[in-house]
Image (tube, helix red, strand yellow):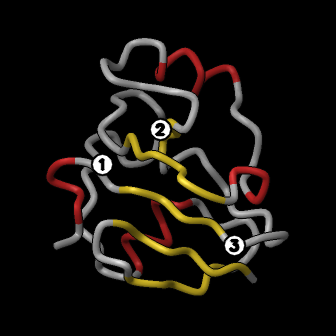
Amino acid sequence: MSTLTVLPSGKTIDVAEGTTLLAALLGAEMGILHKCEGQAKCGSCHIYVQEGRKGLSKIAREENERLDTIVGIGSKSRLACQAKVLGTENVTVELLGFGSGV
């Protein structure tokens, strides 16, 4: 089990190992865009991982290719639908735009 902190709201969520960040955020009723229902086809669930990147699954080829098409990505960028919690450390993410949860 890991704790997920969501910025800018500061809300914390307990997340089970193997859960995607998207599933955790939706389960906590956080507002996050997700147009393709978690298929890594659209990039609308793009987030920034501010802390605890080692507590998430590695970026797979499909996610990396999708991230390459998104304006404004950086080294902290992930797709919430593809990043799975490993349960090894706590994670802090920043939601963007309409997915701010506030």
Numbered disc in front, either 1 or 2: 1
Quickly name the residue at label 2: 39
**Amino acid type, mark 1:** His
Q: Is residue 89 left or right of residue 45?
A: right
Mark 1–mark 3 contact, CB under 8 Å? no
- Mark 2 or 3 closer to N-term? 2
- Mark 1 or 2 closer to N-term? 1
Report, in whole angstroms, how far the alpha carbon at label 1 lies from the one at label 3: 23 Å
Q: Is residue 33 left or right of residue 80?
A: left
**Amino acid type, mark 3:** Asn
Q: Vertical placement of 31 versus 2: above or below?
A: above
Residue at image x 72%, y 54%?
Answer: 56
- Which secondary structure, mark 3? loop
Foreground of the two, 9 or 88:
9
Quickly name the residue at label 3: 90
- Mark 1 or 3 closer to N-term? 1
Numbered disc in front, either 2 or 3: 3
